[in-house]
Image (spheres, grey):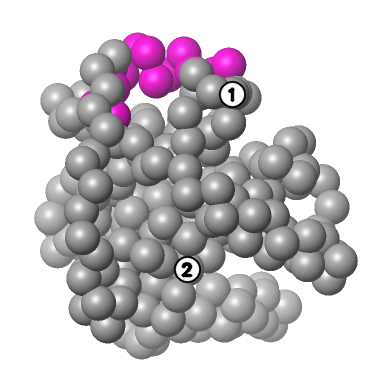
């Protein structure tokens, strides 16, 4: 495993689009670190930036309470005050896979599995493992990786609602994937691209009705549940 700590750089104004995205992404890391400091049983999934801020998906037995959120915000502020370094590493696939297994983070394993074997693997984490104070490492996803991760997380939520969902991770061009879905008579096709990841939406196409436009996950669930209840296609 090779490790390189990024040299300190002068930040641009927060109004600069790229700097703002970096700040939001860093905040997502800090959120994950705070949650796992306070609730170590929580598993992390994905935590990207969005056009309006950032978020992180967590898996835990019970939902967070308003009191939990207050503790999390306070812990985030404490972490920021410590001014820990942000460390970037290029890692060996076998090493990071063993580390993810030791941490028992199955959703990170899904992200690792989605990265082609011939691509280098880069991760970021906050703090220093040698000092015993660090966030769990996060693989650095490319735009395509963020799309895959968002698709996987969306599919998992739909599966939890009882829907049969499969993610096409073939890497084929979008047009070919849509044609394949049509030939296989798949009733609903969901497309995830850069816009959908940033806006947290889904582009939906029905075999029966054609293009349904852009929907939120909740809107898609409602339409699918309605179609099942009415025993009809949508």
On-image quarter of the N terminus: top left
Q: Is residue 201 left or right of residue 159?
A: left
Q: Is residue 149 left or right of residue 194?
A: right
Question: Quick check: can you spot residue 157?
Answer: no
Which image quadrant is residue 86 in? top left
The secondary structure that dominates the magenta segment is helix
Other residues around mark 2 within 10 Å, as few (<14) / some (14–19) / many (≥20): some
Q: Contact, CB < 8 Å: mark 1 with mark 2?
A: no
- Secondary structure beneath dot 1 equals loop
Residue occupying image coordinates x 76% and y 45%: 38
Residue occupying image coordinates x 48% and y 36%: 127
Which image quadrant is residue 90 in? top left
Task: Look at mark 2 in the image and give the residue it sits on.
Answer: 54
- In three-dimensional space, the C-alpha distance between marks 1 and 2, rounded to whole angstroms, equals 27 Å
**Mark carried by residue 150:** none
Question: Quick check: can you spot residue 217?
Answer: yes
**Residue 212 at x, y percent in the picture:** 38, 86
**Residue 91 at x, y percent in the picture:** 28, 22
Which mark is in front, 1 or 2?
A: 1
**Mark carried by residue 132:** 1
Q: Closer to the camera, 46 or 189?
A: 46
**Residue 54 at x, y percent in the picture:** 47, 68
Q: Is residue 130 above or below residue 212?
A: above
Residue occupying image coordinates x 16% and y 48%: 172
Q: Is residue 164 left or right of residue 22?
A: right
Q: Closer to the camera, 8 or 223?
A: 8
- Secondary structure beneath dot 2 equals loop
For marks 1 and 2 on the same chain, the one whose residue lies earlier in the sequence: 2
127 drawn magenta: no
Q: Which residues are magenta?
A: 89-102
95 drawn magenta: yes
């Amino acid at each position: 495993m090779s490790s390189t700590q990024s040299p300190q750089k002068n930040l641009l104004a927060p109004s600069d689009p790229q700097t703002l995205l970096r700040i939001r992404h860093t905040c997502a890391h800090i959120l994950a670190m705070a949650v796992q400091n306070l609730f170590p049983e929580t598993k992390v999934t994905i935590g990207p930036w969005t056009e309006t801020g950032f978020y992180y998906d967590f898996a835990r037995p019970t939902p967070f309470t308003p009191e939990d959120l207050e503790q999390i915000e306070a812990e985030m502020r404490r972490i920021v005050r410590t001014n820990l370094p942000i460390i970037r590493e290029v890692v060996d696939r076998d090493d990071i896979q063993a580390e993810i297994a030791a941490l028992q983070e199955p959703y990170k394993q899904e992200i690792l599995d989605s990265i082609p074997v011939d691509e280098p693997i880069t991760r970021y984490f906050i703090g220093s493992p040698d000092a015993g104070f660090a966030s769990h490492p996060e693989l650095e996803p490319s735009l395509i990786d963020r799309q895959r991760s968002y698709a996987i997380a969306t599919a998992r939520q739909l599966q939890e609602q009882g829907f049969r969902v499969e993610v096409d991770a073939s890497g084929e061009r979008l047009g070919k994937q849509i044609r394949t879905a049509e030939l296989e008579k798949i009733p609903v096709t969901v497309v995830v691209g850069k816009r959908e990841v940033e806006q947290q939406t889904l582009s939906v196409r029905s075999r029966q009705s054609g293009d349904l436009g852009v929907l939120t996950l909740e809107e898609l669930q409602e339409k699918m549940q309605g179609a099942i209840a009415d025993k009809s296609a949508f």
